[in-house]
Amino acid sequence: MNAVVDRTPTTKVVPATAKAAPAPAAPVTPVVDVASLVAENNKLRKAVESLDEWSQMGCGKISVLARLALDWIDKNHLHGNFDTIETVLNMIWYQSDDMSNTINVEAEEVGCNFRDPDQERRSIARDEARVKGRI
């Protein structure tokens, strides 16, 4: 007996009611107004810089006032009479410096810290004077 084997590939018939899966949708690219993003970014940066500047200036003044009051107590040898005031002034001084530093670090981490151009200029001049041996 000779048997003939048909090796042609068979095609699967799909009923007319079955639907093929829809083709994946093309990714939607959002329209971005770069100019408005840059403007918003600049506005945010300026706000953070201003907050940092205000904290440095305001806290710096509070700190100086507390230190002046403490110096006055020291120079007039009034420690025994002003223990509570001395403690409060030390707390004000510490809190003021701590708050200013904390705000500055947060602003600096996002590149928005306030830089006082006069302070930077004096710092550079002082460093140059040290290098040249004038200080």
Image: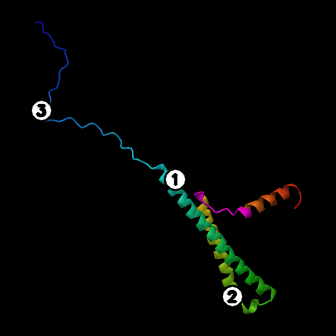
Q: In terms of image quadrants, where is residue 96?
A: bottom right
Q: How many neighbours does mark 2 have within 10 angstroms: few (below 14), some (14-19), or many (20 or more)?
A: some
Q: Is mark 2 on a helix, strand or loop?
A: helix
CA gap between label 2 and label 3 equals 92 Å
Q: Quadrant of the C terminus?
A: bottom right
Question: Which amino acid does the dot numbered 1 rest on?
Answer: Val
**Relative to 62, residue 127 above or below:** above
Closer to the chain start, of discs 2 and 3, is: 3
Q: What stretch is highlighted in magenta?
A: 109-119
Give the residue displayed 73% in from the left and 84% down from the top.
69
Tell which tag, 2 or 3, sits nearer the viewer: 3
Q: Is residue 116 magenta?
A: yes
Q: How many neighbours does mark 1 have within 10 angstroms: few (below 14), some (14-19), or many (20 or more)?
A: few
Question: Which amino acid does the dot numbered 3 rest on?
Answer: Ala
What label does residue 38 carry, if any? 1
> Which residue is outermost to the top?
2
Q: Name the residue under label 2.
A: 85
Residue 11 image point, x, y percent: 17, 23
Question: Which amino acid does the dot numbered 2 rest on?
Answer: Ile
**Relative to 106, residue 92 above or below:** below
